[in-house]
Structure formats: C-alpha cells, structure tokens
Image (cartoon, grey):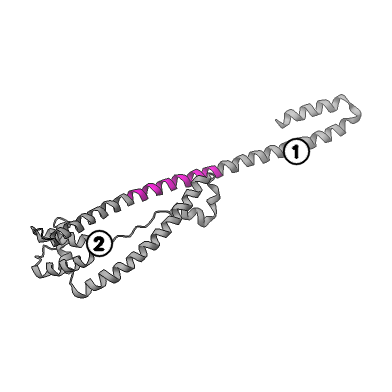
Amino acid sequence: MIPFFRRIRKKLADDNKPIKYLRYAIGEIVLVVIGILIAIQINNWNEANKRREKELHYLTNIKTDLYLNIKQIDSYITKRNEQIESASTMLQHMEGMPIMDINVLNAHALNIYTWQRFFQINNTFQELTNSGNLTLITNDSIKNALLDIDSQYKKLKAEEDHFRFDTETLLYKPLYRILDLNPAVINYTFHASNGQAGENIKLNEAQYEIQNLLIGNII
C-alpha cells in the first residue's frame, strides 16, 4: 500500500521540477501519517480480539460453573427429599405404625441427623472480580445476573450458618451427651455400604427408645 502511494507522490513531484522537493517532503509526511493510522487501527483490532477471546473464555468457564452448581443442587434436593421421607416414616412410627425392621428404622433416624453444607462453585467469578477483569463482560445483563447470584448466595450462606448454629446447639450437643451413637453409626454404615464397611451390630430396644425420644424432640 505505501509503495503505491510513494509512486504516485514521485510522479506528481517529477511533473513540476521547481516544487519537486516540497511535494516530496509533503508526500513523505502523508505516508508516515497514513502508516501510523493504519498501525494504530491494526493494534486496536488486535487488542479488541484479545479482549473478546478473554471474555469468551470467562463466559465459557462461568457456564461450566453454573452447570456444576445445578448438578450439585439437584443432588442436594434428592438428599433433602430422602430426609423428608425418613422424617415422615419416623412420625408414622411414633403414631403407632409397627416397626418391622429396626435396622431400617435406624437408617431413617440417622438420615434425619445427616447434615450437608452447600458450597457454591464460583471460581471463575472470583477470578474475574479479584483480577479486576469483570469489565471484560460486555453484556450488562450477564454481568448484573452474576452479581445478583453472588449476592443471593451470601444471603443464603448467612441463613445456613444461623440454622447450623441452632442445630448444633439444640440437637447435636444434647444428643452426644446422652447417647452413644457409635453402634448406630456402625450398623448404618454396614447396611448403607451393603456390608463393605461397618458391622452388622444388633440394635436393642433400649437404644431404639432413646433414639425415638430424641427424634421426637427434633420433629
């Protein structure tokens, strides 16, 4: 491109010898300015492409994180539904439904006590905010949605921490003071693992009565 302009400029300069050098100098300046402008534009395009590549990389990873969170939440929902069924079964026993298998009863009892905490997978979002690269996300709707999710998660964690404190104070501490859960846990582990772990310890009626009392206090 520049050699082409040079040839045109030289031709114009040669046609008029008295002002040849003036035209030549002006032509050189014009060529330099054009070259600088083209270089700046190319550099801007390259920088824009790099920013876009980074943005797409972050968005792809955020999408992966969200799918992993959904999968984890689905697993938690399944577990919570199982615990609801166990609590319902224990209520039925307390209301007079006969106990057919004390091992099954023990499994329902321990299922109610099981506690799981949810930890959000947000490594990509944390990297964006900590590095100051959140501005790379050009779509304001996506950016605001990510900020809203982070805010809601913090609120839910605060509520979970409060519930955890209540559970430990009102349930776990009294339970550990009056009941040895070791036999029940060993028995539960044996049946939950199909005999691969734990031991098939026989649970007696006294153990059941204590568990029944404690579970009644929970529910």
Which comes sooner in the sequence, label 2 or label 1? Answer: 1
Q: Nearer the viewer, residue 63 or 35?
A: 63
Which residue is painted at 66% across and 39% down in the image?
Answer: 41
In magenta stretch: residue 55: yes
Q: Residues within 10 Å of mark 2 (few under 14, many from 20)?
A: few
In this rendering, would 52 be left or right of 175?
right
Q: Nearer the viewer, residue 23 or 88?
A: 88
Badge 1 is on which residue?
A: 33
Which residue is painted at 39% across and 54% down in the image?
Answer: 121
- Image position of 202 with respect to 72: above or below: below
Badge 2 is on which residue?
A: 114
Q: Amino acid at mark 1?
A: Val
Taking the image as drawn, is residue 38 in sight?
yes
In magenta stretch: residue 39: no
Find the magenta span and give its range. Answer: 51-72
Q: Secondary structure at mark 1?
A: helix
- Point out which mark residue 25 bears: none
